[in-house]
Amino acid sequence: MAEARTAYERRATIRSFDNTDEVPSILSRPERYKQLFTALSAPGVISRGAGLTYCLASASNQGRSVLSTQFNRFLAFDEESKIVRVEPGVTMGALFEFAIARNLLPPVLPGYPLITVGGAVAMNIHGKNQFRAGNFGDQVKNIGLYHPSRGEVSCGPEVNPDLFRLTIGGFGLTGHITSVDIALSSLPGRCLVAKRHNVSNLVEAGYLMEKLSDTSDYTYSWHNLNLRGRRFGSGTVYEEHYSNEGPVARRTRTAVSTIKPLPCRVYNRLTVPLLCGAYQMKERVAPRTLRSSLYSTFFPLIGKENYFRMYGKRGFREYQALFPRERWEEACKQISVAVEQSGGLIILASIKAFRGKRNLLNFSGSGICLALDTPNTPSAGILFARLDEITVDLGGIANISKDSRLSAQTVRAMYGAHYEEFRSALRDYDPERHFQSELRRHLNV
């Protein structure tokens, strides 16, 4: 890569959000489109949003990461169709506030408001209502896309549909997003009411969530995976419904863009059982129903950043996998054995209900999604290797954006023909591999 740099560029070490991987790179922060297109012209470049993925999807070793944060304007809004056009640097929190002010709502929202729209498209993120609203890409009507060798083009379900499909959940490898058209929905209620359902184990939780997803607006859960036997995964399933009995609350706390880890890890074999046990007891004695503001419900990680800091400088690992419904009970049994044999410490575990079809390397489809967090230790490596085997054997898929450890061989085994189709289509579209990231190298696409 050319060594020449401009005033809006600097050398930087870019780290994954889970603090397990890092690379030296040039970080470019253009403020005008002329600067943007110049920065994107060099090979080995990749676009970067908020940098909140758990893998290095927006950085490459000795490459150039081009930030979209300065391109954060709302470009157009059609009141009749409820479609808003934004630049890629618009955050999901800003999109939420724009919509709420007009009695509308983005149908799909992640757990943290600083995630950018461009990043949401590149990872095709999901929320707590995937079973009802699908993934973020299902609400996208058009994308403006720039590639140095092709110029700027539009793609959508009806215009350049193959490119559109390749770009949604395409990890930013088809080009730099310049605009996104998003369909908003009418605001169903002014707040959300959550009902708590205590469950004895992970299997019971999955079946209950499947039942609740037929009538609820949102579902999610918390589980204690540090228990053994029939109690493995006991916890609480939350069922949320819209209500008009309360004020619409917007931002109540400010999100932080950088979460610095503590010098040492707080989570260990003494503290984890105590913390998980205390939280579980709190939820069991709490009132069955809870009324929450929309902002705090959609962005629950606001104000809880210390959770990530307490993993320390070595960071954490997250495994998120989607299992077919008919294999859920077997998945729970095998995961329970894997956790016990590896000695892994599970700080946080949650499940969600999914509905839909699989598409290329998107984390989508039908089934039950399990996510678990653990400190980045040797036992985590042993556990995750076993989880890879379980996921493949049971016909599941892992969320690529949540795990910088996943290899091309593992992803190919999980995604099968979808992996081959993505790899072939991407190389046909960009044979020079102009857009490059560490994630692309890991996946060998």
Image (tube, rainbow, N blue to C red):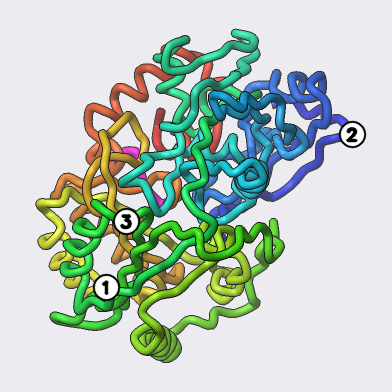
Q: Quadrant of residue 299?
A: bottom right
What kind of element bears circle 3? loop
Estimate the spatial distance between the alpha carbons at disc 2 and disc 3, rounded to whole Å: 51 Å
- Whichever of callouts 1 and 2 sits on the residue coming sooner in the sequence is 2
Residue at the disc numbered 3? 216
What kind of element bears circle 2? loop
Residue at the disc numbered 2? 7
Residue 359: x and y in percent read 31, 30
* Residue appearing at x 45%, y 29% in the figure: 168
Estimate the spatial distance between the alpha carbons at disc 1 and disc 2, rounded to whole Å: 49 Å
What kind of element bears circle 1? helix
- Whichever of callouts 2 and 3 sits on the residue coming sooner in the sequence is 2
At label 3, the amino acid type is: Ser
Q: From the viewer's perspective, tell me whether residue 380 is left or right of residue 147.
A: left
Using the image, determine if residue 102 lies above or below residue 283. Answer: above
Q: What kind of secondary structure does the magenta stretch mostly adopt?
A: loop
At label 2, the amino acid type is: Ala
Q: Which residues are magenta?
A: 405-409
Q: From the viewer's perspective, tell me whether residue 68 is left or right of residue 209.
A: right
